[in-house]
Amino acid sequence: MALYSETVMDHFQNPRNVGEMPDADGIGEVGNAVCGDIMRMYIKVRDGIITDVKFKTFGCGSAIASSSMATEMIKGKPITEALELSNKAVAEALDGLPAHKLHCSVLAEEAVRAAVKDYYDKQGIAYDPAVFGCEDCAKAHEHDHAAGEA
Ligand code: FES
């Protein structure tokens, strides 16, 4: 069996929605400290719907395929649905990734979430930091609140 599915190869060789978005409503940049790959995701939001998505990935083929697939999966969807996008769903949509490449799809999930978080922050939309599953963000938030109240 080939290491990579045809879908992975297709999205790697013909990635969808590649590029930058100068007027993005939210930008998420994440990296993996181990492999050093970096992914940046841009979203445009209108009335709670993600109307456009672009990405730039400096990374391996699986990371490029994962980000390409992720953009297709959230485009035209409500922002709340994008938040629910899991790396498992991305990997499944790609017809699987080798076990040692699953972390590449995690990067895509994290980049989408980071872009949504950035959108919320820029718009001043309140959210529960726990939604982003990031204790550091939650702490930073508490800190902001504490500073604001001081
Ligand atoms: Fe790290 Fe693919 S090898 S994102």
Image: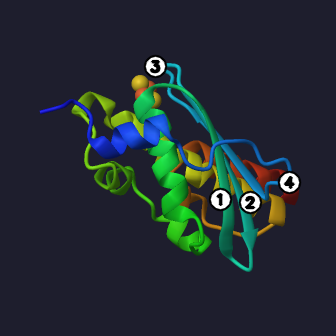
Quick one: label 1, few (<14), some, or many (20+) residues within 10 Å? Answer: many
Quote the CA–CA distance across marks 1 and 3: 24 Å
**Of marks 3 and 4, which one's residue comes earlier in the chain?**
4
| Residue underneath mark 3 | 35
Q: Are marks 1 and 3 in contact (CB under 8 Å)?
A: no
Residue at 11% from the left image edge and 33% from the top image edge: 1
How crowded pointer 4 is (Cα within 10 Å; few <14, some 14-19, many 20+) is rated as few
Residue kind at label 3, given as amino acid type: Cys
- Determine the residue positioned at 83% across, 51% down: 147
Q: Residue 53: x percent and y percent?
A: 65, 56
Q: Name the residue type under label 4.
A: Asp
Q: Position of residue 80 (x, y in %)?
A: 56, 72
Say which amino acid is labelled 2. Tyr
Mark pair 2, 4: CA separation = 12 Å
Q: Which residue is mark 4?
A: 23
**Could you tell me residue 123's position as x and y percent?**
82, 66
Task: Say what amino acid the circle numbered 1 marks.
Answer: Val
Q: Which residue is mark 2?
A: 119
Give the image quadrant in which the ligand numbered 1 is located: top left
The answer to whether mark 2 and mark 3 are in CB contact below 8 A is: no
SS of the residue under disc 2: helix
Vertically, is 26 above or below 45? above
Q: Nearer the viewer, residue 148 or 75?
A: 75
Q: Residue at x 53, y 42 (%)?
A: 15
The residue carrying mark 1 is: 116
Left/right placement of residue 22 relative to residue 41 reads right
